Image: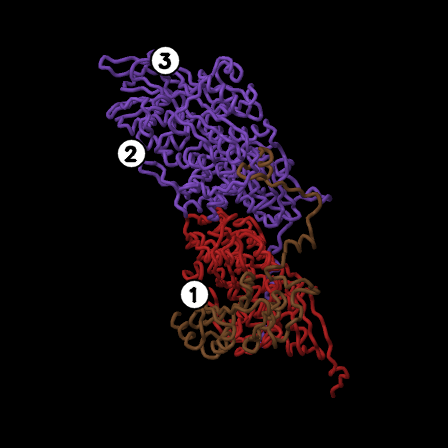
Chain colours: A purple, B red, C brown
Amino acid sequence: MSLKNALAPFGIWARALARPYTIPVEDIMRAPADRYRGWHTNDAEACIGCGSCSDICQNAAIDMVVNRDATKGDTGLRPMVDYGRCCWCALCVDVCPSGSLGLSSEYTWVDKDPEVFRYVPGVDKKPWDDDTKGWHGGEWDLINHDRVPMSMLPGETRGQTWAEVVLGYSEEEAQREAARCLECGICTAACPAHMHIPEYIGAIRDGNYEQAVNLIYETNPMPEMCGKVCTRRCEDVCAHAKQGEPVAIRWLKRFATERFDDLREVIKADVAPIGVGKRVAVIGGGPSGITVAYYLAIRGFEVNLYEALPTLGGATFFGIPKYRFPMPSLEKQVDMLRGAGVKLHVNSPVDAALFEELRSTHDAVFIGAGLMRGKAMRVEGEDAPGVVNALTFLLEHHLRNNTDSDKVSKEPVVLPGMKVAVVGGGNTAIDAARVSLRLGASEVVISYRRRKEDMPADWEEIEDAEHENIQIDVQAIPLRIEQTPDGRLDLIWGPAEMVADKPGARPKPVLVEGVENHLVVDRIIGAIGQGPNLRWLSPEAQGTIADKWGWIKVNEDGMTGMPGVFAGGDLVNETADAISAIADGLRVVQGIPRWLGLQ
Amino acid sequence: MTIENPHVEKETQLWVGPQHPGVTGNMAIQVWLTGDTIQRGITHVGYLHRGFEKLMERRKFIQSFPIVCRICVPEPDTNEYLLAASIEELGGITIPEKAVWLRTLVLEMSRLASLVQQIGGGAGATGLGAVPNWTYTLRDYILDSFEELTGGRVYHMYMVYGGVRRDLPVGFAERMEATLRKIEERLPYIDKVTFQSSVWRERTQGVGLTDPAWVKEMGISGPAIRAMGFARDVRRDFPYLAYPELDFSVITSTGGDIYARMEIRRHEVVESIKIIRQVLQKMPKDGPVAAPIPNVFTWRIPTGQTYVRAEASRGEMGYYTVTDGSDKVRRVHVRGASYVHGFAMAERMFEGLNIADLHPTLVSIPTCPPEMER
Amino acid sequence: MNEFVQEIQARFEVLWSNPQRPDLMQIGVRQVNALPLLTWLKSNTGYFILNHFSAVDWIEDGEFQLTYLLTDYAARRSLMVCVRIDRAAPTAESVHHLWPEAVTYEQEMFEMFGISFPGSPRQGVDLLLEGWEDIPPMRRDFDTAAFAEEAFGFRPGRTHTNPRDRVAIAFGQKGFLHDH
């Protein structure tokens, strides 16, 4: 043992005069680190009550409690945290799709009552509610904000072909996209038909495609149509849409139905034959009529369906171009009606006499005749030759190309090399523009009164049109149409200024006086909406079931003012989309048996 | 003249722990003594068994992170890393470069915090109260850095599948450097009262020995085996993360006693500081800290099994993970270094040990009951 | 690594092999070959260290899997030996005479899975559980959620509403293909 080692321990006496090594208490009471994970905060207005926080919590510390009414896009539930179980891992923050949940950096809270350590963040006010420090979403999230991209025909060349633009998901892509679903079910509220969306997406994810299409058919007899062209309000409220791209619900539905060439063997209905011996007449073979016919037929009703055109589908036939919704897809869904035993009467317009006959020979009549009158632009000169309505334009185009109807001229309105202007901003305007392009138009311009973000058309449709080099002029108010000396048309328009309207409403376009712009074209297509046309009914019948503009009013069972006469679809609801028409049909599917005393 | 002790032949049975300040956590040693010499001893655990392995079988993959970090208080990050690495291997996830370095950083920070704590523990077990006071303070400075980086002091939950949850905060490297300097300044004082002190040397040298030939074939690792001349270190033998790109030494000694094990730790603190400085210097400045992973609610991983390992301060830590195509693990077996150290090796060392040397021996191995029980 | 598997194959039947990583080979052998193989590996190869020893319950196959992990530190490689045993009569040969550390592994597997290793010194001695009377808790058919519910429960006053159910009820979600 050396002396050095024996004395070594005393060396630390050198510290005696140094600053104390321990930390004064004031230093300990320092602020927590910026990312410290303390008590929860929640922006209760931004929260959508999807319950992802509750699902991820491995300690079962989070309950979803009722805080407000459920609305489209909000379950009305808010997370309540039990701090007897919380371990402050912040996984709840990382999976929060709305980004509303966070952890403040505050961690000290002393109270004698253990019950207070359970509260609804953001609803039960706390001192740290506005703490911007702590652990918040946005920097890095556990959920995947990006959807699996859809393959499409290239934009530059597809304008020359009628082939379907969207190519559909592969099995791997569909399963990957389906796996993004958080299964909160918020989408089902926004869907007019309240389809079983999380359930069928889950079935797709697991590869149970038969189960998926059966779940889809629970509420939708035209899923392949919806899978291709639905207005998909579900995706607008998808939890993922808050910070990223919504789950591609529409494309997944399309994928599931396209797995099967013939759905008749796949769909397995199991319902009581309550309608045996009862007869129902359906006027109009669009989505609402098909819905009523299909679900009543599988319940044993004898259903006669009357369609004025040579083929079923209604607006989904004559309105939607075939590069979006091809004929075989439509045929597949009509086959389901045949399989269910619906008697189809095509080329059979109903008039006042036939309507009375149907009422007397059937237990119930359903009117789903749709909006067959294109609205006028109400500008001077719109009766000039070469100015057409989009509805007529699309109807004639589809009859000419997809049926053997002899009621339309063989010559299309738009000929190769023409320059076309389309007035309007809805899906019909986009469809008319893209059909014109495919008919050979050299240049197509869409002219719309408001801004691009105000366009009612689906954002993907707008993008698709732009990819096809269709020009979109916005804030353009049509003033009048003049014929040029060389036989062309001059659409004279004035620029619009956007002026704020009442709160919640879109800003209004107001004409900037004194400026006139000219758009010289060969054809002008007006696509500014459709209206009802009930002139095929007797005036008495019109007065009983409809208001003076021709809109039909129905009760909660879908029945009109005329006993036994039900209605649905675009004539009844204001949204004028297929899925709302299907939802109307579903209401009538319950209403007719109830009215007949069958339940 | 010697006075005959009439009781010398009698055997006394004694329970040390589970509530005993000298025991590293909640465990008990049942010893049979003759006089103050231990004849044999048995390790008893079960005082804090939480069934973590079973809980993981009932949870989605991501939900296991808040569980595994609780397997080891001083070094939660090794558990986070091993769970992440095993699931990433089975689920086919590659982590970005930046995450590799950030993971290396926290693993080494946790090793450093744990090594520093163990030096204090080792000194404390021999009655030197000042050293644990210093080392626990130093550990707290490291915990400050953890708090700043991960949002948590003790349980960090910093790693996730795909990478880590956050990038370095601004100015982190400078503050970390200040902490490393504090540790370096303190080391000479620790040396003076322990490694250089003849009293402490007397107390620890030649105590807590075991047969190197026996140890060689067992799954013994860390300072316990490096103190017997075997240069086994997972960071060197089975390189992972950024360790292949780092310059550090595997410290060995041949004493095989308490002193040798503590001395290795003392040198490893220096190596660890060296590694942290290198990591902070070589780490890429930009790039994502995590790769996207499938939806954590529905992620399914095909059938497979793997064993991943990492070097914790106590030695080799390994996760045996089995997946079965579902959204949960089929089995996770957490193999902590103490599992072998605390039973087979400790029980062998107890034989012939003086009762007063029991705690310094246990602490020097060391044993950590939470990872023995999970 | 593959040559090494062939070397084993020459002596013992290898049911399957899987090179999981360059440094980790997995092989499956029959139970009768397990102890001879492990003994041979320990005495004749670099794989003389037992790093890890554990069991997996494959309840749907009616089998337990025993997994031995042996490491060759010189070659920096590991070999995972997997053995399936009958779940109805779970007995395996002890390896504690090769590696004394295996006593604890075997003690724990007896307690947690009910797998017995005759001859192993601490079979049946409590390791982690005291007075446990239920089925061995690491078996797949032991329901931890039910156990926790019974033993601990939730604090009173907690209510949870499933968001999906609330939406379905609030908006009257129905199905028309089946009578509900």
Which of B349 and C10 lies nearest the eye of the viewer? Answer: C10
Q: Is residue B16 left or right of residue A308?
A: right
Q: Quadrant of residue C59?
A: bottom right
Q: Outermost residue toward the bottom?
A: B1
Subunit bearing disc 1: C
Distance, label 3 to label 1, CA atoms, is 77 Å
Residue A522 appears at what percent x and percent y?
Answer: 27, 19
Q: Position of residue A345 (x, y in %)?
A: 42, 27
- Circle 3: residue type: Val
* Image coordinates for residue C49, horizontal then vertical, percent: 50, 73
- Mark 1: which amino acid? Asn
Tag 1's secondary structure?
Answer: strand
Q: Nearer the viewer, residue A245 or B29?
A: A245
Compared to A213, does A473 lie above or below?
Answer: above
Query: Which part of the image, by quadrant, shows the C terminus of chain A?
Result: top right
Look at mark 3 in the image and give the residue it sits on.
Answer: A379
Label 2 sits on a secondary structure element that is loop
What is the crowding at mark 2: few (fewer than 14 residues within 10 Å), some, or many (at least 20)? some
Task: Name the front one of labels 1 and 2.
Answer: 2
Q: In the orientation shown, which residue stands out farthest toward the right?
A: B6
Disc 2 to disc 3, C-alpha distance: 33 Å
A82 w.r.t. B17: above or below: above
